[in-house]
Image (cartoon, rainbow, N blue to C red):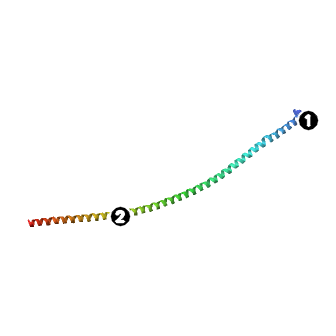
Amino acid sequence: MQQLFSAFGIDWHLLIAQAVNFGIVLIALWYFLYKPVLAVLEKRQETVAKGVEDAAKAEALLAGAGAESAKRVAAADEEAEHIVSAAREAGNAEKARLLKEAEARAVAVTKDAEERAKEVAARAERESEKEVARLAVLAAEKLLKKHYD
C-alpha cells in the first residue's frame, strides 16, 4: 500500500498529521462555534415562542378588555338613562309645583283685584250718594227759594 501511496505522491505521515489537525479543528469548531450558535438559536427559538405566547395572552386580554369596556359602556348608558329620567321627574315635579304656586298667586291677585274693585265701587257709591244728597239739598234749596221769593 505504501507503493500505491508513493505512486500518487502521498506521504502517509503527512496524511495522518493532516487528519489529526482536521480532527482538532473540527473539535475546536464544534466547541467554539457550533455549540454557541446552537445556544443562540435555542434562545432565539425560546424568545419567539415566548413572543407568540405573549401575543396570544395579549389577544385574550384585548378581547377581555373589549368585553369589559362594552360592559362599562352599557353600565354608563344605564346610569345616564337613570340620571336623565330622575332629572325629568324632578323637572316635572318642579314644573307642577311652580304651576300650583302660579295658580295660587293668580287666585290671590284675582281676590285682591276683586276686593279693590268692590272698595272702589263702594267708594264711588258713597261719593255718588253724597253727590245725590248734595244735589237734592241744592234742588230743595232752589225750590224753597223759588217758593218763598
Q: Is residue 40 left or right of residue 120?
A: right
Q: In the rendered view of the protein, which quadrant contains the N terminus?
A: top right
Mark 2, other Cα within 10 Å: few <14 / some 14–19 / many ≥20 = few
* SS category of the residue bearing label 1: helix
Q: Is residue 121 above or below residue 53?
A: below
What residue is rendered at 68% in x and 50% in y?
52
The amino acid pointed to by label 2 is: Ala
Q: Look at the picture and state if 7 lies above or below 121.
A: above
Q: CA distance from mark 2 to mark 1?
A: 143 Å
State the image coordinates of residue 127 (x, y, percent, origin top left).
Answer: 23, 64
Say which residue label 1 marks: 2
Residue sitting at x 54%, y 57%? 76
Residue in the picture at 26% in, 64% down: 123
Q: Which corner quadrant of the image does residue 94 belong to?
A: bottom left
Q: Amino acid at mark 1?
A: Gln
Front-lying residue, 3 or 12? 12
The picture quadrant where one finds residue 103 is bottom left
Q: Nearer the viewer, mark 2 or mark 1?
A: 2
Left or right of 93: which side holds 77? right
Q: Nearer the N terminus, badge 2 or badge 1?
A: 1
Quadrant where the C terminus is found in the figure: bottom left
Q: Residue 97: percent from the left, percent from the top?
A: 42, 63
| Residue that protrudes farthest toward the front in the picture | 148
Instruction: Categorize mark 1 by other alpha carbons within 10 Å: few (<14), some (14-19), many (20+).
Output: few
Please tell me the numbered disc located at residue 34: none
Q: Which mark is residue 108?
A: 2
Q: Is residue 34 left or right of residue 64?
A: right
Left/right of residue 31 with respect to residue 87 in the rendered view: right
Residue shown at the point (80%, 41%) measured from the top left:
31
Please tell me whether mark 2 sits on a helix, a strand or a loop: helix
Q: Nearer the viewer, residue 105 or 23?
A: 105
